[in-house]
Image (spheres, rainbow, N blue to C red):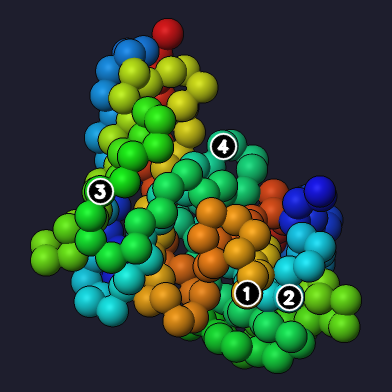
Amino acid sequence: DAGVTQSPTHLIKTRGQHVTLRCSPISGHKSVSWYQQVLGQGPQFIFQYYEKEERGRGNFPDRFSARQFPNYSSELNVNALLLGDSALYLCASSSTRTSGRFLHEQFFGPGTRLTVL
Amino acid sequence: QKEVEQDPGPLSVPEGAIVSLNCTYSNSAFQYFMWYRQYSRKGPELLMYTYSSGNKEDGRFTAQVDKSSKYISLFIRDSQPSDSATYLCAMSEGNDYKLSFGAGTTVTVRA
């Protein structure tokens, strides 16, 4: 089975621009979460979507938004990019049915590395 | 104060040594405790999880949780060069899926 996939792999933008990152969850997973991992730090929770509804939001400004589509794929949008938005953006999917070692296990994709110049 | 504290290291050990990693946390509502391994340029992958307090062993890996002290540990026995990676502790309150991560400890196992 394919794991979580993310696109693009790398992205370079300039300050003030907008970016869209994409994520496809593991087949059958209905929940998608987004995390931001700044170099040298652990991932920080941004959003979680379940069945196309926002289920949780981390401490991020309104410049960050996301949505989930009927096929459970997801997009993360960031407006008015700042230098501090440079990070690895991780998508994780999970299932309400046990598909991993435990019910809440989140499976992470390889991430999109965003560089803001 | 961060919700989850983890010494970022780095930690360098010879092959065959025991690697000891730990995290402390402040949120008493955490019920699920996890250790993820992250190789360079990859996403994190789950190594171990523990629900509430106790010990769990899986091959060369042992996870311990002491909720009374708000302290969790991961031990890697007979470490191998392939264990060289960043190890992240993560926790959640259980009913939601938000994970709170530590900063990660970078481990290098020397052959």
Q: In the displayed structure, would residue A33 be above or below residue A106?
A: below
Between circles 3 and 4, the one closer to the viewer is 3
User: Horizontal placement of A34 versus B51: left or right?
Assistant: right
Q: Hey, which quadrant is residue A81 in on the image?
A: bottom right
Q: As drawn, which residue projects farthest toward the top?
A: B111
Residue under label 3: B55
Q: What residue is drawn where x is 48% and y is 33%?
A: B85
Q: What residue is drawn where x is 29% and y is 29%?
A: B19
**Are circles 1 and 3 on residues that touch, CB within 8 Å?**
no
Marks 4 & 2 on one chain: no
Camera-nearest residue between A11 and B16: B16
**Are circles 2 and 1 on residues that touch, CB within 8 Å?**
yes
Marks 3 & 4 on one chain: yes
Percent x, y of residue B55: 25, 48
Residue under label 4: B39
Q: Hey, which quadrant is residue A73 in on the image?
A: bottom right
Q: Is residue B102 visible?
A: no
Q: In the displayed structure, would residue B44 be above or below residue A56?
A: above
Q: CA distance from mark 2 to mark 3?
A: 31 Å
Among numbered discs 3 and 4, the one appearing first in the sequence? 4
Q: What residue is drawn where x is 46% and y is 27%?
A: B84
Task: Using the image, name the chain to which the residue with label 4 belongs.
Answer: B
| Mark linked to residue A96 | 1
Percent x, y of residue B90: 40, 59
Amino acid marked by disc 3:
Asn
Q: Is residue A25 visible?
A: yes
Percent x, y of residue A102: 51, 60
Q: Hey, which quadrant is residue B10 in on the image?
A: top left
Residue under label 2: A30
Between circles 4 and 2, the one closer to the viewer is 2
Amino acid marked by disc 1:
Thr
Which structural element holds mark 4? loop
